[in-house]
Amino acid sequence: MASLQASSFLVSCSCSTRINAAISVPKLPGIRISVPRNALNVVEELNLRDGFTSAIPIEKINTATNTRIDQEPATTRATVKLYAILEAVADRVEMHKNIGEQRDNWNKLLLDSINMIILTAATMAGVSAGAPLLALKLSSTLLFSAATGMLLIMNKIQPSQLAEEQRNATRLFQQLYRQIQTTLALRDPTELDVKDAMEKTLALDKAYPLPLLGSMIEKFPEKFEPAVWWPKSNETQGRKQPKKVTTQGKNGWSEDLEEEMREVIEVIKKKDSEDYMRLGNLALKVNKILAISGPLLTGIAAAGSAFVGHGSWAAIVAVTAGALASTVNTFEHGGQVGMVVEMYRNCAGFFTLLEETIESTIQEGDLEKREGEMFEMNVALKLGRSLSQLRDLARKSSSSHADGTSIDEFASKLF
């Protein structure tokens, strides 16, 4: 019995005694452990709570973690940047789409409102000729004056042209969006891809501005110019002289293909670009005449309505000028002449861009960078032709040069 009590006493004493031991963790030579940042606090807590005398070196963990971040591949950073540009482009697509719809509504509402004001004022002027009342004369004059001011503003901003600008901007931003998506899907992007996408985005912002005040495109320039929505590169300045192609390369580029592209450029310059520049100049002149005629006629009608009652000629002038003003306004904004001008600007810009693209490809000194058969297919698709039709066009152009005649066919079959 005494032995049992002694043994239990020893056990209780040993249990009540605090175990104060330190666990020594050997350092791992040359092994880097990537630890998340939020795991460092957990390591410190374990060191203090468990009484470690040889703790895990936190400084070395920080060094290893930072080294991994600093040595992150450049392609990953380029991918992140390109995705950021992709989001910005998607936002611009939505903005230009919404603003385009808003400005199209402007054109419709302003057209209907101004025509109703002009017709109401002309009716009042005609009625007051038979019974010259001061209220009708004053109302008619005020309405004609208001229509004159509204027409001046409407003709200055050209809502139909503004809407067409935003439609073109939406289409071009969608095109850029798909190009960036294709780059991300086919390969790892580089910093050059990021720079190219950034320059294209900023060039589109400059070509199709959103605000009206300050940066709006001039609607009545002195000379008709094609739209330019692509960045002007300086690559041709430092580019090597193009080599003479004698054999077909690995990418399908050959001497025959180079001659074919040169003939296509000639046709585009002499037929398509020249024709759209001519039509654009004509549409711009017509739009200028209409933009001046509308407010001028409403101003004459306002002056005539003010003299109603002093002779039959005043009422005739007011009613006739008002009817003509309504007709001119309907033809200009109902027929969307401003939209036609912008359409010709965009088409001329399309052919200018195609010319520059073909010329820069031909002048490329490194033959391996020329796309060859793929480039020929892209040119054919942009012109709405098959490969055989594109080659036939080049042969016709070459034979016309030999005969000293001009080709009677346009390069593009789309527009």
Image (cartoon, rainbow, N blue to C red):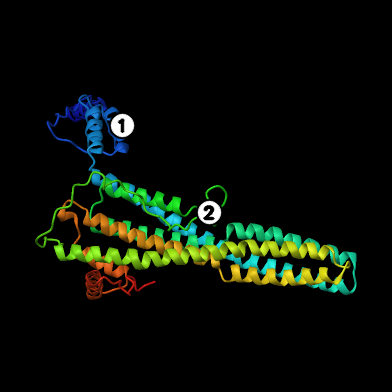
Q: Which mark is residue 16?
A: none
Label 1 to label 2: alpha-carbon separation:
68 Å
Residue 28 or residue 117, whichever sits in front:
117
Amino acid at pointer 1: Glu
For image coordinates 29% across by 30% down, the residue present is 44
Of the residues under marks 1 and 2, which one precedes in the sequence? 1
Percent from the top left, x then y, of residue 382? 32, 67
> In which quadrant is the N terminus drawn?
top left
Examine the rendering and report whether any part of residue 299 can be seen: yes
Is residue 336 rendered to the left or right of residue 2? right
Judged from this view, the residue extending furthest toward the left is 247
Percent from the top left, x then y, of residue 136? 85, 67
Is residue 104 rendered to the left or right of residue 351? right
**Mark 1 neighbour density, 10 Å: few (under 14) some (14–19) many (20 or more):** few
Examine the rendering and report whether any part of residue 140 can be seen: no
Q: Nearer the viewer, mark 1 or mark 2?
A: 2
Percent from the top left, x then y, of residue 364? 21, 53
Is residue 247 rendered to the left or right of residue 152? left
Asked if residue 111 is positioned above or below residue 213 in the image, the reply reads: below
> In which quadrant is the C terminus drawn?
bottom left
Q: Secondary structure at mark 2?
A: loop
For image coordinates 51% across by 66% down, the residue present is 283
Percent from the top left, x then y, of residue 402? 22, 70
Residue 369 or residue 293, whichever sits in front:
293
Q: Which mark is residue 45?
A: 1
For image coordinates 27% across by 45% down, the residue present is 191
Q: Which mark is residue 218?
A: 2
Asked if residue 50 is positioned above or below residue 248 in the image, the reply reads: above
Q: Secondary structure at mark 1?
A: helix
Asked if residue 194 is positioned above or below residue 47 in the image, the reply reads: below
**Mark 2 neighbour density, 10 Å: few (under 14) some (14–19) many (20 or more):** few
Amino acid at pointer 2: Glu
